Amino acid sequence: MSFPNVGDDVRLILAQFVDINGVAKGKIVPRAHWDEVVSVGAGFAGPSIEGTGLPRHGARSEFFGRADTATARVLPWQRDTLHVICDGFVAGEVFDGCSRQTLKRATKKLSALGYTLNVGIEPEFFLFERNQQGKLVVPDTLDRLAKPSYDLKSLQRGRVFDCLRELEVALNQYGLDVIQIDHEDAPAQYEVNFKYTEALASADNLVRFKLAAHAIAEKHGLVYSGMAKPFADRPGSGLHFHLSFANAEGSAVFDRGDGTLSPLGLSALGGLLHHAAALTAFHAPTINSYKRLTGGGSQSGTTWAPVDIGWGTNNRTLPARVTAGRIEWRVPDPTCNIYLSLAAVIHAFIDGILSSSSPGDPNESDNYAAAVASLRRLPQTLGDALVALEKDTALTEAIGAHICAQHVATRRDEITLFQQTVHDWEWAQYADKY
């Protein structure tokens, strides 16, 4: 396999994959070993990667990240390095614990039905700085409006603006079509929107976005944070999915033609809502995620995060917002593994379509102001979401038993670690009370 035509200045390869958490991992390989990265893969000790479940010895202890050559891009901030996204292989076979392979299997199954899932992803995030004590704080002390959405003063001030400008340039060089950047509803919180594309390519683009955001923020003395809920009294960060199907001719088939959902789109939505509790275990995979998905207000007057399972027309108070003939799924947050999350969505869609599922009636009221009693509530803790996932055997079997089991085990380890940790709140609440 010939090396991509990217010029002689490129001498290194960043062979990258994601672990069960969706966190980028990889290694640097000299350009001379391109053929090996493509044909065999860059080698890694399998049990050293979180969530593989691989043994410490034997043929299946080695994980190989095999380059998908179509993903090769020169790093905009490191022009001597070619970034390539890898698929996981073990013992020469597709690894069922690789989340990117899991998404590829899901898209193949959907393709067999004649459809392609197009996804637009909206990452919200914080840009912090570390103070002298090592604590992450808001870098702009003037960024303190109670309702800071779309605040232009903070958006265009100082290091943050320099960082966002450089990020926009880098993302476009990286192949992402940046549509808009704005200040979100909490101090130091921003959103970058880039153009939708097919599910796998969209997931790859989010990985590219996060690599760029981390690197460029650090260059400007800032820290990129995808934490779901840094501040108790402010809205958290979501990672909304805009979801639609195209048929073999490229026509949008969720759209009835007037911006409402077609019968196919309604069945797909029905599957999404039917499996919503289990899906939450993938879309909100950290303990902190559930600080975002609970009821209550914020200084700005709303949290913008769903609590009850339902849908409505252009209704941002529910998990599924139907607009312009597509579904905006508002449950996910930036801590999710994007490949695993989209694979789960596809299988929920397929189940809804094959079973002619109904999403029920739309709810057109403000669910924050007056919750609809008939709606089921999303899981309110990570533990509850994991139980829901384990009970949803149809979904876990469709996604893949091994990777679902590893996801559950990894998340339960996090719960145990949290339960064993004594937190500042406990000191303040109990230290001298009794």
Image: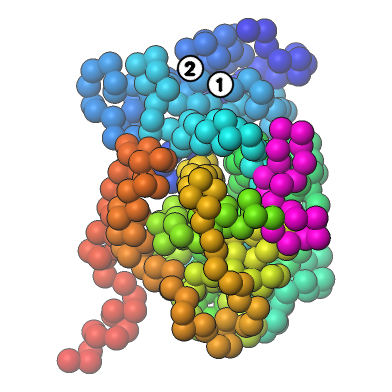
Magenta residue span: 244-261
The answer to whether residue 278 is above or below residue 52 is below
> Residue 393, position in %: x, y?
32, 48
Out of 96 and 412, give the one closest to the viewer. 96
> Where on the picture, by quarter, is residue 391?
bottom left
Q: Which residue is mark 1?
A: 67
Dots 2, 1 in contact, CB < 8 A: yes
In the image, 369: left or right of 10? Answer: left
Helix or strand or loop: what does disc 1 sit on? strand
Q: What residue sits 26% from the left and 70% below the top? A: 422
The disc labelled 2 sits on which kind of residue?
Answer: Gly
- Between the C-alphas of marks 2 and 1, the distance is 6 Å
Q: What residue sits 32% from the left and 37% below the top? A: 402
Q: What residue sits 54% from the left and 48% below the top? A: 353
Verify whether residue 326 appears in magenta: no
The disc labelled 1 sits on which kind of residue?
Answer: Ala
Q: What residue sits 39% from the left and 26% below the top? A: 95
Q: Which residue is mark 2?
A: 41
How many neighbours does mark 2 have within 10 angstroms: few (below 14), some (14-19), or many (20 or more)? many
Q: Is residue 108 visible?
A: yes
Q: Residue furthest bottom?
A: 433
